[in-house]
Amino acid sequence: MNSLKILLIEDNPTLARQTGEFLEGHGWHVDFASNGQLGLQLALQQIYDLILLDLNLPDMDGLEVCRALRQQAPVATPILMLTARDAFADKAQGFHSGADDYLCKPFDPRELALRCSALARRRELHRNDEVTIGTLCISARRREAARNGQPLKLTTITFNILWELACAYPEPLSRSEISHRIWGDAPPDSDALKSHIYSLRRQLDKPFPRPMLKTISNIGFKLEQPGED
């Protein structure tokens, strides 16, 4: 299993720390939010492979967070609910709110890790193999990309960067997020990403009258169709 980027929304600091340390022991990256508002903010600002969501939160509860994510998030990230509520009605509420899985507290962290892996695999299996943005067409299976019918000559790294940006479209990806998705926990120096972005621009934008790859100041990069604001 590749390195996962996980958001853990949990208000119990001891449980959050113990769970995060266990998951990070699998080589996964874990971001933390101690309340629903912060968790929703992070989930809408970044792209995660998986969200672990406590049902009992001090501000907005997990059901509210789950519904808001399903309504507002551009990517349907798998959501695993963690809660002490084990009645069928509680589980039904969670699934009806948009959760993908449900794990009752107290739980064996080994089971949590297995469920994380299963949800991540399921997401990859259902992930669209082809993405089209205006005249840009990308096939992950064939590892080919073309704009206006003109094939783009991309290296492995520049193709991977383009694919991640296309999957995130129309949202931007931060430099650190691109780096993590391409190189995992062992990224090269910052100049390497800069060099690959430059190479991608030469293929994606230079032969055409209007660019698609946009730099977002103090954030990162995004794709946009020519003519978009």
Image (cartoon, rainbow, N blue to C red):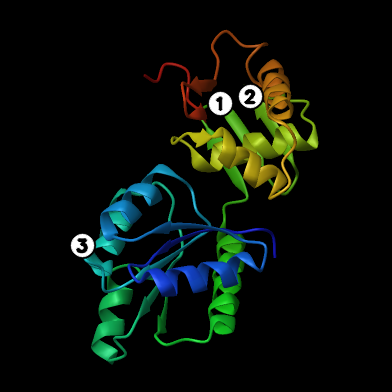
Mark 2 touches mark 3? (CB < 8 Å): no
Spatial CA span between label 2 and label 3: 44 Å
- Between discs 2 and 3, the one toward the N terminus: 3
Examine the rendering and report whether any part of residue 39 can be seen: yes
What's under tag 2, amino acid-wise?
Arg
**Residue that badge 1 annotates:** 135
Answer above or below: position of 151 versus 206: below
Along the viewing direction, whichever of 215 and 57 lies nearer the viewer: 57
Tell whether 183 sits left or right of 148. right
Instruction: Identify the residue at horizontal 70%, vertical 65% (top origin).
Output: 1
**Residue that badge 2 annotates:** 147
x and y, in percent, of residue 158 in the image? 72, 32
What's under tag 3, amino acid-wise?
Met
Mark 3 touches mark 1? (CB < 8 Å): no
Q: Nearer the viewer, mark 3 or mark 1?
A: 3
Answer above or below: position of 175 versus 216: below
Instruction: Give the numbered dot on residue 60.
Output: 3
